[in-house]
Amino acid sequence: MLAVTVPAVSQVSRDELDEARLARDQASARLDEVVAQYDAVYNDLSEVTYRIGQFEERVTAYQKDIGELQQLVQDQAIAAYKAGNITGGGVVFGPSTLTELITGREFLERAAQNEISLLDRLTSVRNGLEATQTRLQEDQAALQDLEREQAQFVAEFDFLFNAMSTEYEELRVEFAEQERIRAEQERLRRLTELARLEGAAAGASVNQTVGFVCLFDQPFRFVNDWGNARSGGRTHKGTDVVAAYGQNVKAVANGTVLKRNSDLGGISLWLDADNGTSYYYAHLSGYAGGLSDGSRVNVGQVIAFNGDSGNAQGGTPHVHFQIHPGGRGNIPVNPYPTLVEHC
């Protein structure tokens, strides 16, 4: 993790300014790396969490099946015992109680000699339970590793965002031109990348996003994560825009808002723009004061605050952002091209 110390402007020499700029560039480059690395960890974490849920359900089902099969075997053993059919080479089993008798493996095998498939099924289900429990334990261990890795990324995000937004504020004027050049170079690189996209991945047209402004002020980061794998066979239908926790989130267009809350998206909202396009913001930490369902908002107005609610809890604060040309009833398209153009 970078250690950044920036002197006051009045004390900044040319060498100190160059050193501070270098540290800032390193922080910026590392932030880009962390965004990409975190996305991979987030995908793995989502998938492992989903599998654990499936394994836990399967374990419960196996345990239920085992209980039912054991009862069937015992019922059959009791019936055979009462009928006097339990012998072994002329030897009648004689434990002190029937309970001891029906819990003996040898007796159960003899009692079920005409229904051996029942014991086979019981053995098969027990084997399935053991295998599932083993895989569950492996995934639980993997989950702990991924959660630790996620926590490290979250801590580094906090540091890097603070380094770029707070410690460099005193040198804001000196860095302004450098930041403009860096941003333009990054925009051109991403525009080259966009030329290869087709269909929904190519995003919304210019006419569908007239007047669009960025949902965050700098610093923030995003990558083209459209279509990336998510738990349960889902794919990512938006762009995760990473920023500091609590950072202002703005209306990207003039329109009307609807507040929502769910296990998946957490605190979220829809912005139905006046031109017919709808925008979805998820994982917020809260809404701006006075915002209610049906509120009219102006482009650039602060409407919410960045967070990690919903299934992003404990992860890197970000807004999951979607664009729906034609309104909420229509399928989303990749927000990345629009964000590259305007952010």
Image (cartoon, rainbow, N blue to C red):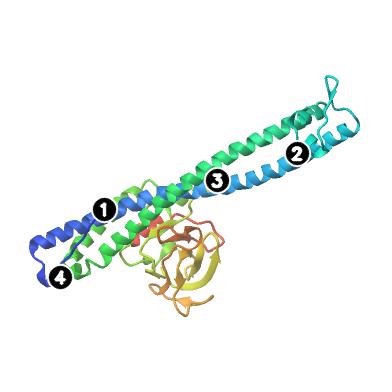
Disc 2 to disc 1: CB gap under 8 Å: no
Sequence-first disc among 1 and 4: 4
The span from disc 3 to disc 1 (Cα, nearest Å) is 34 Å
Residue 266, percent from left and from top: 51, 64
Q: Residues within 10 Å of mark 1 (few under 14, many from 20)?
A: few
Crowding at dot 4, Cα within 10 Å, few <14 / some 14-19 / many 20+, comes out as: few
Looking at this view, is 275 or 140 the one in front?
Answer: 140
- In the image, farthest residue toward the front: 96
Q: On residue 51, which mark appears?
A: 3
**Where is mark 1, residue-wise?**
29
Question: Would you say the residues marked 4 and 3 are in contact, meaning their CB atoms lie under 8 Å apart?
Answer: no
Q: Earlier in the sequence, mark 4 or mark 3?
A: 4
Task: Of the two numbered discs 2 and 4 on the same chain, state the one appearing first in sequence.
Answer: 4
**Disc 2 to disc 3: CB gap under 8 Å:** no
Which mark is on residue 8?
4
Disc 2 to disc 4, C-alpha distance: 77 Å
| Discs 3, 1 touching: Cβ within 8 Å | no
The quadrant of the image that shows the N terminus is bottom left
Mark 2–mark 1 Cα distance, whole angstroms, equals 61 Å
Mark before the other along the chain sequence, 2 or 3: 3
- Residue 59 visible in image: yes
Between disc 3 and disc 1, the foreground one is: 3
Q: Of the residues under marks 2 and 1, which one precedes in the sequence?
A: 1
Disc on the earlier residue, 3 or 1:
1
* Residue 225 visible to the viewer: no
In percent of width and height, residue 149 lies at 39, 50
Q: CA distance from mark 1 to mark 4?
A: 24 Å
- Residue 204, by quadrant, is bottom left
Q: Position of residue 297 (x, y in %)?
A: 45, 76
Q: Quick check: 116 left or right of 164? A: right
Q: Name the side, left or right, on which 53 lies relative to 1.
A: right
